[in-house]
Image (cartoon, grey):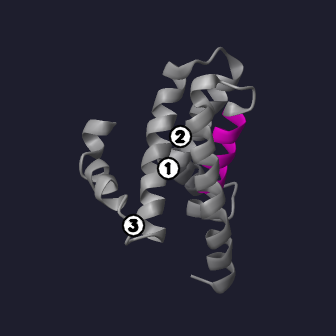
Amino acid sequence: MSARFANVVNIAYPIETALKLIFVVISPFNVPFTLLLAFLASLIGLLRVLKTPQFTKEYLAKFLQNNHGQNLLYISFGSVGFVNYIYFAPIVLFFVYGIVEFVKIKFPQHGFNFYGDLVRQNKFYVY
């Protein structure tokens, strides 16, 4: 991993996680920019994972197989119609899991990780 890309990840990952946390908190209230926060968090996550966007079939396949890419499509559909908390629920679950992963990676000694490990071990049942 190049030093330049490592710096981008070190900056983008906390921003992505902060956007996810804000989304999780405000999603029950469905304020006007709720979907925008989810879109930005997923876009940053996608760019963090897949790196530079390319207009190739391989990149499109990676985009569609990546959870962040799937979220972007799901969020795009929601921007066209009516949304409520039931619509937000899958995104909230995915984002909470992402926050748990962030805490595990960035703060490995934190006491919260005990609960995060429970979520991580039961990911199938949580989803």
Disc 1 packing (10 Å; few <14; some 14–19; many ≥20): some
Q: Which mark is on residue 87?
A: none
Q: Depth check: 56 or 44 in front?
A: 44
Q: Looking at the picture, tell me which residue is in the foreground, 115 or 119.
A: 115
Residue 106 locus on image (x, y percent): 48, 70
At mark 1, the secondary structure is loop
Residue bearing the label numbered 1:
66
- Give the answer, above or below, for where 120 lies relative to 93: below
User: Which residue carries the number 2 mark?
Assistant: 70
Between marks 3 and 2 in the image, the one whose residue lies nearer the viewer: 3
Towards the viewer: 58 or 102: 102
Instruction: Give yes or no for contact between labels 1 and 2 (Cβ–Cβ under 8 Å).
Output: yes
Specify which label sits upstream in the sequence, 3 or 2.
2
Q: Which residue lies most toward the top here?
A: 82
What residue would you read off at disc 3?
Answer: 110
Q: Which residues are magenta?
A: 35-46
